[in-house]
Image: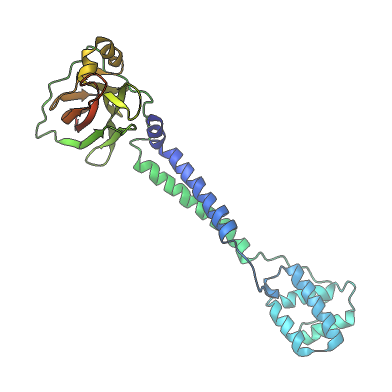
């Protein structure tokens, strides 16, 4: 869970991965696989200049044999506005064709005879080839702008990494007697409930300022179970508070009556955080550099069975209220 939070709070990686995935889906999946571009019914005007020249040479041969002026005129028109320049090139370089046949076709087309070899016209790139580099550049600029906007909007969380382990408060620390005032309203308030059978119980909540700035996180998760078999029998929970301006995550271990009374169990769980006995209406305060978290047991009940009495929870509801110290 901590690893997921750590990666989710790195907007640069999120932006890069999103761009690569979007590029792959748009170009490969949609552009090349589902809806590839297909050229059909292309005319002579869509051909490259060298193929237009081949087309007109064949038209000259056809006109020499058939003398069909209608067909010849249609073929010249189909080539488009470049037909005159290409005919001048053919006239200057007859190759294996009869010069008189070329001259007759050129005269029919209304092209003035060339004086010497004509220069070969430069290849004119197609519309798609002319616009493709610009479209790629615009796409890259838009992607860069989106990444930049994403970074600026999340700059409050891009400068730190979420801790991968939760550290406990110093052993000598005591829960401060803290009372909220009207000048210090709560930043956020959450309710979370564990019910036996929820073996993956691990709730976490984001703490934001009134302006939407990320300040930290808090949550509750399973800390210790007892016995064997399913469902798991939870005997202790971890209530934790993370502050982006602090180097550690403060944790309190909320224990069942059986776990809290057992010296060995209590000492072992104390390594995770300050041990607290779970009781109805029990209140706890977790404090970091800039945040307070008031945790209160709203309701709870123990499960029954072969295990010792009051050793595992059947149900527990906690209220978490986050406040700013600044």
Percent of width and height locating residue 151: 39, 41
Q: Nearer the viewer, residue 171 or 12?
A: 171
Q: What residue is at 48 percent from the left and 47 percent from the top? A: 19
Q: Quadrant of the N terminus?
A: top left
Q: As displayed, is residue 245 above or below residue 53? A: above
Colouring method of the image: rainbow
Residue 286 can be seen, yes or no: yes
Q: Quadrant of the C terminus?
A: top left
Q: Is residue 68 left or right of residue 127?
A: right
How many numbered dots are placed on residues in this image? 0
Q: Is residue 151 left or right of residue 102?
A: left
Q: Nearer the viewer, residue 268 or 78?
A: 268
Q: Nearer the viewer, residue 96 or 167?
A: 167
Percent of width and height locating residue 304: 22, 26
Examine the image and state in which quarter residue 156 appears: top left
Percent of width and height locating residue 153: 34, 43
Percent of width and height locating residue 115: 83, 76
Q: As displayed, is residue 127 above or below residue 246? A: below
Q: What residue is at 12 percent from the left and 27 percent from the top? A: 281
Residue 290 can be seen, yes or no: no
Examine the image and state in which quarter residue 285 appears: top left
Q: What residue is at 81 percent from the left and 84 percent from the top? A: 105
> Which residue is farthest left?
182
> Which residue is farthest top?
263
Q: As displayed, is residue 79 above or below residue 282? A: below
> Which residue is farthest front?
306
Q: What residue is at 69 percent from the left and 79 percent from the top? A: 78
Examine the image and state in which quarter residue 171 appears: top left
């Amino acid at each position: 869970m901590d690893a997921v939070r750590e990666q989710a709070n790195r907007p640069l990686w999120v932006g890069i991965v999103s761009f690569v995935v979007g590029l792959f889906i748009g170009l490969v999946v949609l552009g090349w696989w589902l809806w590839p571009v297909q050229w059909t019914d292309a005319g002579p005007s869509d051909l490259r200049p060298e193929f237009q020249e081949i087309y007109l040479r064949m038209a000259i041969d056809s006109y020499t044999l058939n003398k069909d002026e209608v067909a010849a005129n249609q073929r010249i028109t189909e080539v488009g506005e470049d037909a005159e320049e290409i005919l001048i090139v053919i006239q200057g370089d007859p190759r294996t064709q009869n010069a008189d046949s070329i001259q007759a076709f050129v005269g029919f087309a209304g092209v003035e005879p060339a004086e010497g070899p004509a220069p070969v016209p430069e290849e004119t790139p197609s519309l798609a080839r002319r616009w493709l580099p610009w479209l790629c550049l615009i796409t890259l600029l838009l992607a860069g702008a989106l990444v930049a906007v994403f970074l600026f909007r999340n700059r409050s969380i891009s400068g730190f990494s979420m801790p991968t382990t939760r550290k406990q408060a110093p052993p000598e620390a005591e829960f401060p007697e803290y009372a909220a005032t009207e000048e210090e309203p709560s930043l956020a308030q959450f309710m979370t409930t564990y019910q036996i059978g929820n073996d993956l119980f691990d709730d976490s909540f984001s703490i934001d300022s009134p302006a939407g700035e990320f300040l930290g996180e808090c949550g509750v998760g399973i800390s210790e179970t007892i016995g064997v078999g399913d469902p798991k029998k939870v005997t202790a929970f971890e209530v934790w508070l993370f502050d982006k301006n602090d180097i550690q995550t403060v944790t309190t271990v909320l224990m069942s009556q059986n776990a809290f009374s057992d010296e060995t169990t209590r000492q072992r769980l104390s390594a995770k955080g300050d041990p607290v006995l779970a009781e109805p209406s029990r209140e706890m305060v977790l404090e970091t550099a800039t945040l307070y978290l008031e945790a209160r047991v709203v309701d709870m009940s123990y499960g029954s069975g072969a295990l010792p009495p009051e050793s595992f929870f059947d149900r527990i509801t906690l209220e978490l209220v986050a406040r700013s110290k600044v």
